[in-house]
Image: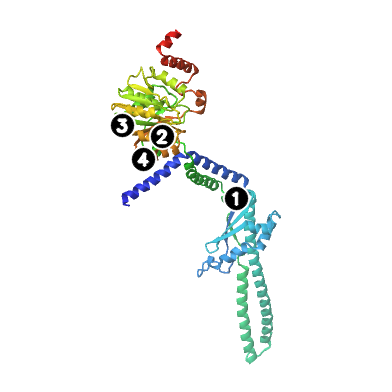
């Protein structure tokens, strides 16, 4: 396969996906709406969690807070500070600050601690069912954490200062004893020199201890400061409204796409001319309104059928037979199928119309609409359209016939048509497959009359395959806009273009008059 073939296949596949999605857009809309409803219901029913955040800046507790040798943040440890903030001791203090509204275990489960900038900045998150509880909990955990750090520092410094005080007191006592020795000793003696040296050592050590004690007593034991309280930060909600709704919409859309491709093969009814043309792989010559079903056609329907006639005459030749498949699923033959022959005859061509299937009432209506004269050997000529004749076989329904619709007389009528005559054979798609296959065999071309929302892909596909198998060209289709169910009910079982009972009764009377012999009419008179 060359690059052009591959590009064509890719385009065809993409077109197919677009076609299916456009055809099943209702499923996409319904699935998307259901996804939105499901996500909204989840937001209403699911327990809501509000997350409040408090941000802290920790103080480094050291005697040299402004030392240039090492940054203060380097004296903090991430893991240690996180463990302290999530400790049971801090949770207990926070529980006391909350007046017992939450146990230490609940506080530890609801709180999350994160550090940054070398643990210099600590973020405390607290989850609660309500915004007020979340804000209060986050601030309580942060306050308990800072107070614990401060208390721990003060405690350690207190122990160190106590030890230094004890050592300083001991040295002062020793220094007093040495001073007494110096007073009583001879300045020139060895004892005096030794006491002097000892006194100097004690004073030096005392100076160092006093310096350490003064340094410890000046240490800032504040645990840190609150950079932003919980009420100053944006609250987080779980499940998030926007994310949940978007997820529901996206999930519904994805499920709708899947459902559209699953349902599309099962949805066999063709909705519009584009779908009819795609299924038939042939053009739709025109679209007519089934609500205006006049015979002969009038107004816009007549204009559309004239366009169809001109397109058909490009592909068909005089003396040939055109099989018109009526796939409208009406109770009687569609007027559009009849009008294809009528408009062709109106342009001056000799046309023979054969409609093997149909009730007696239908034939009466047909005779009235086309003003047919007396039938001779089953052939009746239209008074209003002299080049149109309608053939009606009298051997229909005989089980001894080769076919119940295309009988011997029908075959003879097709064979006897002149070289300048176009024969239109109208068969319903509901006819027995044998009759349709026989029609395909005797015809030189095929035209389909389809109705939106009634014609199915199954019958179109079968007809296309059978026509291709015997190389009978399927020229195209005429599409009818479907009738609403109420209109179908109103029309009842009468032939569609006779919409009122008065017109039906008049048609019957005229048909009887048309087929009576002159002698019978004179006797009745």
Find numbered disc 1 in the image and state the secondary structure of the residue it sits on: helix
- The label number, if any, that marks residue 468 in the structure image: 4
Mark found first going from the N terminus, 4 or 1:
1
Give the CA distance from mark 4 to mark 3: 17 Å
| Residue 115 percent coordinates (x, y) | 55, 61
Q: Is residue 278 above or below residue 234?
A: above
Residue sticking out furthest to the top:
525
Calculate the distance from the C-alpha at mark 2 to the C-alpha at mark 4: 14 Å
Real-space CA distance between mark 3 and mark 2, rounded to the nearest whole angstrom: 20 Å
Secondary structure under the numbered disc 3 in the rendered image: loop
- Which is in the foreground here, disc 3 or disc 1? 3
**Residue in view at x 67 percent, y 84 percent:** 178
**Where 95 sits versus 325, above or below?**
below
Q: Residue furthest front?
A: 400
Q: Quadrant of the C terminus?
A: top left
Find disc 2 in the rendering and name its residue.
436
Would you identify the image quadrant in which residue 110 lies? Answer: bottom right
- Label 3, on which residue? 316
Q: Is residue 412 left or right of residue 20?
A: left
Residue nearer the viewer, 147 or 525 = 525
Of marks 4 and 3, which one's residue comes earlier in the chain?
A: 3
Which residue in the structure is indicated by mark 1?
A: 231
Residue 87 screen position, x and y as percent: 64, 63
For the residues carrying marks 3 and 2, which lies nearer the camera in this image? Answer: 2
Query: Could you say which is closer to the camera, residue 523 or residue 302?
Result: 523
Foreground label between 2 and 4:
2
Could you say where residue 187 lies in the image, as x and y percent from the top left?
Answer: 63, 89
- Describe residue 157's horizontal placement relative to residue 316 as left or right: right
């Amino acid at each position: 396969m060359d690059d052009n073939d591959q590009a064509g296949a890719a385009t065809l596949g993409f077109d197919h996906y677009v076609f299916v999605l456009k055809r099943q857009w209702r499923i996409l809309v319904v699935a998307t709406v259901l996804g939105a409803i499901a996500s909204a219901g989840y937001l209403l029913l699911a327990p809501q969690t509000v997350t409040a955040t408090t941000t802290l800046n920790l103080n480094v507790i050291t005697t040299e807070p402004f030392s240039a040798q090492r940054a203060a943040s380097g004296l903090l440890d991430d893991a240690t500070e996180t463990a302290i903030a999530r400790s049971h001791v801090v949770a207990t203090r926070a529980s006391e600050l909350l007046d017992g509204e939450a146990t230490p275990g609940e506080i530890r489960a609801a709180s999350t601690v994160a550090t940054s900038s070398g643990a210099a900045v600590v973020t405390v998150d607290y989850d609660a069912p309500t915004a007020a509880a979340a804000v209060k909990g986050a601030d309580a955990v942060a306050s308990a954490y800072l107070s614990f750090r401060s208390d721990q520092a003060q405690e350690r410094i207190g122990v160190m200062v106590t030890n230094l005080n004890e050592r300083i007191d001991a040295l002062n006592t020793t220094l007093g004893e040495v001073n007494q020795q110096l007073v009583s000793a001879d300045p020139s003696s060895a004892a005096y020199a030794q006491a002097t040296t000892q006194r100097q050592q004690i004073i030096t050590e005392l100076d160092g201890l006093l310096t350490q004690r003064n340094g410890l007593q000046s240490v800032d034991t504040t645990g840190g400061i609150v950079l932003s309280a919980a009420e100053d930060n944006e609250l987080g909600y779980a499940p998030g409204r926007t994310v949940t709704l978007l997820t529901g919409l996206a999930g519904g859309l994805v499920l709708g796409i899947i459902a559209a491709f699953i349902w599309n093969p099962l949805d066999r009814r063709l909705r519009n001319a584009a779908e009819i043309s795609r299924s038939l792989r042939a053009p739709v010559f025109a679209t007519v309104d089934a609500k205006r079903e006049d015979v002969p056609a009038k107004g816009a329907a007549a204009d559309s059928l004239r366009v169809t006639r001109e397109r058909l005459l490009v592909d068909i030749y005089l003396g040939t037979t055109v099989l018109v498949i009526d796939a409208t699923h009406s109770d009687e033959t569609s007027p559009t199928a009849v009008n294809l022959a009528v408009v062709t005859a109106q342009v001056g061509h000799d046309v023979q119309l054969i409609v093997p299937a149909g009730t007696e009432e239908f034939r009466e209506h047909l005779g009235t609409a086309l003003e047919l004269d007396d039938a001779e050997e089953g052939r009746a000529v239209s008074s209003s359209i002299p080049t149109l004749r309608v053939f009606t076989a009298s051997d229909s329904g005989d089980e001894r016939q080769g076919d119940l619709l295309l009988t011997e007389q029908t075959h003879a009528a097709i064979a006897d048509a002149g070289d300048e005559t176009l024969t239109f054979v109208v068969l319903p798609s509901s006819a027995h497959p044998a009759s349709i296959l026989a029609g395909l065999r005797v015809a030189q071309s095929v035209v389909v009359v389809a109705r939106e929302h009634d014609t199915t892909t199954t019958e179109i596909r079968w007809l296309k395959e059978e026509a291709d198998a015997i190389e009978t060209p399927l020229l195209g289709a005429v599409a009818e806009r479907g009738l609403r169910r109420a209109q179908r009910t109103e029309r009842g079982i009468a032939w569609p273009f006779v919409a009122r009972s008065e017109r039906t009764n008049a048609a019957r009377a005229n048909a009887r008059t048309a087929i009576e012999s002159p002698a019978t009419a004179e006797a009745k008179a």
